[in-house]
Amino acid sequence: MMFAAVNTGLLLKQLFNATSAVSLLALVAIGLFIIFGMMKVINMAHGELFMLGAYTMWWLLARGINFWLNLLAAALVVGLFGVIVERLIVQRLYVRGDLSTLLATFGLSILLQRGVAIAFGDRPQFVTSPFTGGPTLLGNTYPTYQIIATVLAFAVIAAVVVLFLKTDFGLRARATIVNPAMAAALAVNTVRMNALSFALGSALAGFAGALAAPLVSVVPAMGLDWVIRAFLVVIVAGAGSIWAAAGGAAIVGGWEAGFTAIYDATYAQITVLAIVWALVLLRPRGLFSGTGRRWRR
């Protein structure tokens, strides 16, 4: 009985850690999905938007500003930065094709990394959690902040789903995703929709970075790992709905977290890449590509 209890406790702990990892990855991936789905822009700087959110949290918290206000501030700051990037860089490159925006955003990612490193140094910064300790179940402690962060992440994801499915903005956004030319013909301001979509995708990445800051080391290169996994999520999910991106995050993030607990992070990343490679061969349009019909409803 004790052996079974220990195994059950460990299983619940790993399930909790996997759920927490999936929630944050889903936030980042959904932001990337919105930008790519609406604008067909491959934003290589999306990981740096996550990093900017984390640094915004650290910088504001160091000046005594309330932690929860900092979450909103990080989303707002990074969202506004996204508008600037879309207006000054991305919008000017639409007619030149995907490669131009890919290279431009890749250059921006390098610029942001080095700029933050020059401003704040390469040394890891740490954000203190607003909570200490947490409930204990079957011999394992579940940190209070990690629980709250997970719930908040899923709440924001639910809010984004409602925004896209139940509001006028969502209707126009879905029309732009399905057929941009037809949406423009029906008086949808696609230029404005693109700017708002880039801002929303950026804000989600910034919010995720701020939310994750107490759980990770805040360094200039922290976004690289997140953007790679977010792209893997989009590849796995395909061009479906936001639920598809969330499902892809569950597959990629859940598998990686579970395999890391059993073996180690290196093997977990290798197996994730192998799974994605196999899925690309078997389902080149993604596992959930059929769910794209939802955008038309």
Image (tube, rainbow, N blue to C red):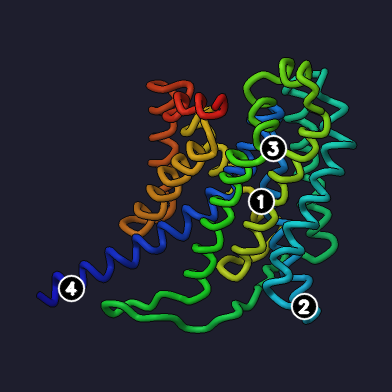
Pointer 2 residue: 65
Graded by Cα atoms within 10 Å as few (under 14), some (14 to 19) or many (20 or more), the crowding at tag 1 reads many
Q: Determine contact: label 2, label 4, CB under 8 Å.
A: no
**Along the horizontal axis of the image, is 167 left or right of 297?**
right
Q: Of tags 3 and 2, which is closer to the observer?
A: 3
Instruction: Tell me which numbered mark, 3 or 1, is placed earlier along the sequence.
Output: 3
Mark 4: give few (<14), some (14-19) or many (20+) Cα within 10 Å: few
- Apparent side of residue 144 relative to residue 128 in the rendered image (left or right): left
Quote the CA–CA distance across marks 3 and 4.
Answer: 51 Å
Q: Quadrant of the C terminus?
A: top right
Q: Tell me the crowding category of disc 3: few under 14, some 14 to 19, or many 20 or more residues within 10 angstroms, Cα based.
A: few
Amino acid carrying label 1: it is Leu
Task: Name the residue at 77% across, 53% down.
Answer: 78
Q: Position of residue 180 (x, y in %)?
A: 71, 20
As rendered, which of 46 and 110 lies closer to the eye? 46
Q: Which mark is residue 168?
A: 3
Residue 5's label in the rendered image is 4
Circle 2 — which element? Answer: loop
Q: Answer above or below: position of 104 versus 85.
A: above
Where residue 199 sits in the image (x, y, percent)? 76, 44
Q: Nearer the viewer, mark 3 or mark 4?
A: 3
Label 2, label 4: how far apart the Cα atoms are: 43 Å
Marks 3 and 4 close (CB-CB < 8 Å): no
